[in-house]
Amino acid sequence: QEKEPQFPDQQAIDGFIDSFSDEELQKQAEKLLKPILKIIDKCKSYEEIYEKLSEQGLNTTQIETILQKIFFISEVWGRLSADE
């Protein structure tokens, strides 16, 4: 049986995630997403979702920027780890 290669950075991330129970993660996700999902469920189009979220003070541009940074960092980290 082949052993998967060990990467300390990935092990640290996995260990952090594994330190939470499924119930804890579910509870936190529900707390954060419940108000947003309520709004989305009531809307009939993407435009309406954007409008309603904006009315609630949720700026999708900020969310998109944060996600872009996360994806960029993840990609760079992955490339650096692969080169080692």
Image (spheres, rainbow, N blue to C red):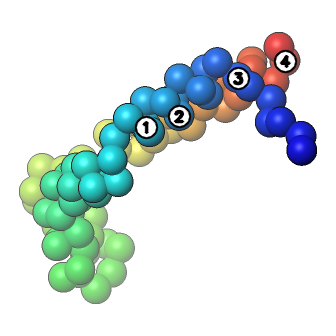
Q: Earlier in the sequence, mark 4 or mark 1?
A: 1
Q: CA distance from mark 3 to mark 1?
A: 15 Å
State the residue position of label 2.
14
Residue toward you, 67 or 61? 67
Mark 1 element type: helix
Q: Are marks 3 and 1 in contact (CB under 8 Å)?
A: no
Residue receiving disc 3: 7
Which residue is more in the foreground, 47 or 73? 73
Bin the neighbour count of mark 2 within 10 Å (Cα to Cα): few under 14, some 14-19, many 20 and up: few
What whole-number distance in Å separates the C-alpha atoms at marks 4 and 1?
A: 25 Å
Q: Which amino acid is tagged 2?
A: Asp
Query: Residue 15, how many percent across, how many down?
Result: 49, 30
In the picture as drawn, the residue positioned furthest to the left comes out as: 56
Expressed as whole percent of the image width and height from the top left, the position of residue 52 reads: 16, 67
The amino acid at mark 3 is Phe
Which amino acid type is shown beneath numbered disc 4?
Asp
Image position of 83 with respect to 29: above or below? above
**Residue in the image at 81% along x and 24% along y:** 82
Q: Are marks 1 and 2 in contact (CB under 8 Å)?
A: yes
Amino acid at circle 1:
Ile
Identify the element where label 2 is drawn: helix
Q: Is residue 65 left or right of residue 9?
A: left
The N terminus, quarter of image:
top right
Work out which quarter of the rendered image holds the C terminus and state it: top right
Looking at marks 3 and 4 on the same chain, the residue that comes earlier in the sequence is marked by 3
Dot 3: what SS? loop
Q: In terms of sequence position, does the residue under pointer 3 or pointer 2 come before the other? A: 3
User: Tag on residue 83?
Assistant: 4
- CA distance separating discs 1 and 2: 5 Å
Q: Are marks 4 and 1 in contact (CB under 8 Å)?
A: no
Residue in the foreground of this view, choosing between 13 and 22: 22
